[in-house]
Each structure stands twice: as C-alpha cells, then as structure tokens.
Amino acid sequence: MSTDLVIETHCDKLPLLFRGKVRDIYDLGDRLLLVATDRISAFDVVLPTPIPHKGVVLTQLSAFWFRRTSSIIRNHLISTDLQTFPSAAREYADQLAGRSMLVQKAHRLDVECVVRGYLAGSAWAEYRATGTVCGQALPAGLAWNERLPQPIFTPATKAASGHDQNISVDRMSDLIGQDLTRRIVEISLRIYRDAHSYALTRGLILADTKLEFGLVDGELMLIDELLTPDSSRYWDAELYEPGRDQPSFDKQFVRDWLESIAWNKEPPAPVIPPDVVERTSQKYRDAYRRLVGAPLPGSST
Ligand SMILES: Nc1ncnc2c1ncn2[C@@H]1O[C@H](COP(=O)(O)OP(=O)(O)OP(=O)(O)O)[C@@H](O)[C@H]1O
Ligand SMILES: [Mg+2]
C-alpha cells in the first residue's frame, strides 16, 4: 500500500513529464502514469500542506466512476493495479500503490467541460448580477444553490496559467469544431444525469462537475479524473436546503478556511492548521465511503 503522505513522487527511472497542481505525470510512450499526490490546491494555488489519503481517494473514485460510465463513453483508464504496471514502475510501489493510474496518452482538448445542476459558486454570482449563467438565460427568482430546471453545460478554456475563463458553447465550437462540441455536450450531460441519480441513492447531491476529453487515434474519450471531490461539488442530500450555504465534500472546506483568514489568494499560500487538515482528509474519505459504499482501501475510517 502507498505511504499515507506523498507530497511529490521521485520515481527516478521513469521520465517525469510534468507536475500538475495535484498529479505527477510520467511519460511511458503511448501511455501515461498519472500519480495523484496528496497536494491540495485552492483558488489555483497549491497549498504547502498535504492532505493524508487524498491522492488515493482521487484515484480510486475516478476508477470507480470510469467503470460506471464506460457504457456511455470510452475512457483513458488502463489499470490502477500496480502488478500490471511496467516493471520499471513496480519498483516504486511505496510511492505509487493505490494512487496511480496507467492511462492512454491522449491529445487533450483544451476545454473544461462543466455541467451544473444547481446554482452554486460562480454561477450564482453571475446569475445574481445578470440573470444568466455563462450567458445562458435562466428563469427569474431562483435561490442560491437551488436546483436548475435542467442541467446546463458551461464550458471554460483551460488556461495554461491563471484562472480558467468561461466561454460560450459557440466559442467552444469555434475552438474544437461543431461535431465534437455537439457530442461532448450530449455525453457530458448524460454523465452528469447518471452520476447525479446514482449519488442521490447514496445520499449525496452532485451539484456540478468538470470533465476533460481527449482524442486517441481520432477517437473521443474521457480523460483526467472523473467525478472526484476535486472536480465536483458534492453535498449531503439530507442537509440540503436551497437559499443557504451547503456543507460540502469538496475543497470548499479549505476554501472557507482560507476566506476566513482573508488570504489574498496570491502565492505563497498559508500552512493549513492540523485540525483543518484532519477534517479535510476525513471529508475526502467520507466522500469515497459514501459513494462506493465501502471504506477507502488502506484506511479504517
Ligand atoms: N489521458 C491523458 N492524456 C493527456 N493528458 C492527460 C490525460 N489525462 C489527464 N491529462 C492531463 O494531465 C494533467 C493532470 O494533472 P493535474 O490534475 O495535477 O493538473 P492541473 O494542475 O489540474 O492542471 P490543469 O489545469 O492543466 O488541469 C492535466 O493537465 C490533464 O489535462
Ligand atoms: Mg486537474
């Protein structure tokens, strides 16, 4: 099993492609090794304090959802089982086990495919100001965090640095083509609807989520992470009440703490206090346990 805390991997015999905010990515030719570390980012800045078990939660939840959605669309996942990895990678079991995925290398489409079923986060801010969300008009009189009449697709560009920028579906068509855009919108909405109803059976509301797509030999497939607390907003269905803040299973928790200390959102980010680290770690494990229905492998809680 993987060590509890991995801030940065050092698999010296494997070619490191790059370190993202959360993942270390190794290049294995036509495949990639995506390693989810325990790093946490908020407001696009990586915090100096890792969150125990977070990387394992992200990898195992993604794998769970990739299996569940495989009848809707193909995905990049080849294996999360270290025993099936190339032998050079198996040497680093202590760093990789539980937290890494062998995937097909894709030509990434540089669009963040966001589906929203509820009026949360930046969508609420825009709606309050203009009555629209990413330019799409919505009925008047909706409350903060209220469920939308139907889920909406609100793409954003994947900015190389800095914050992602919301774009219209027309703009997305200009960038990647009309046919791909139409298919991605349809698939994204199907995945959201399917995941939303499944999550409800486990007592969670999936308020919104971000998907990434890529092309492998011209074929469209789902890549990156899928329906994790980092890419999605999950709420407890029992505590849900529109019109007010929702306790959530995502980074909102760390974001709230950062807001409470009035950090200016410029690096370096402050060290997270131990109680916030522990509660956040527990939140990630809770999300896994509630969605999958079993405790996280290697964790008793
Ligand atoms: N199958 C794949 N082929 C190519 N790139 C992929 C694949 N799966 C994921 N990626 C990319 O690998 C990176 C994962 O690392 P991480 O999530 O840490 O990045 P990030 O900091 O979120 O960066 P970004 O803002 O680009 O998403 C992302 O840039 C993602 O787009
Ligand atoms: Mg990412």
Image (cartoon, rainbow, N blue to C red):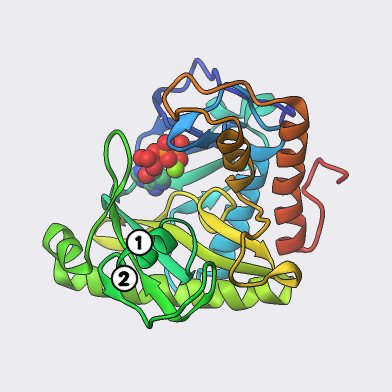
The reply to whether the C-beta atoms of the residues labelled 2 and 1 are less than 8 Å apart is yes
Residue at image x 29%, y 63%? 219
Looking at the rendered structure, the secondary structure element under dot 1 is helix
Can I make out residue 282 in this image? yes
Looking at the rendered structure, the secondary structure element under dot 2 is strand
Residue at image x 54%, y 77%? 194
Residue at image x 20%, y 62%? 172
Residue found at the very far top of the displayed protein: 12
Can I make out residue 99 in this image? no
Q: Position of residue 280 (x, y in %)?
A: 71, 40
Query: Crowdedness of circle 2 by 10 Å Cα count: few (<14), some, many (20+)?
Result: some
Taking depth in this image into account, of 235 and 71 the one nearest to the observer is 235
Q: Position of residue 76 (x, y in %)?
A: 43, 54
Q: Amino acid at mark 2?
A: Thr
Height in image: 55 above or below 151? above
Taking depth in this image into account, of 280 and 5 the one nearest to the observer is 280
Taking depth in this image into account, of 210 and 30 the one nearest to the observer is 210
Number of numbered discs present? 2
Quadrant where the image shows the N terminus: top right
> In the rendered view, does 138 fall on the left or right side of 23?
left
- The image quadrant of residue 248 is bottom right
Q: Which residue is mark 2?
A: 132
Q: Position of residue 47 (x, y in %)?
A: 55, 26
Residue 126 got which mark?
Answer: 1
Q: Position of residue 217 (x, y in %)?
A: 26, 56
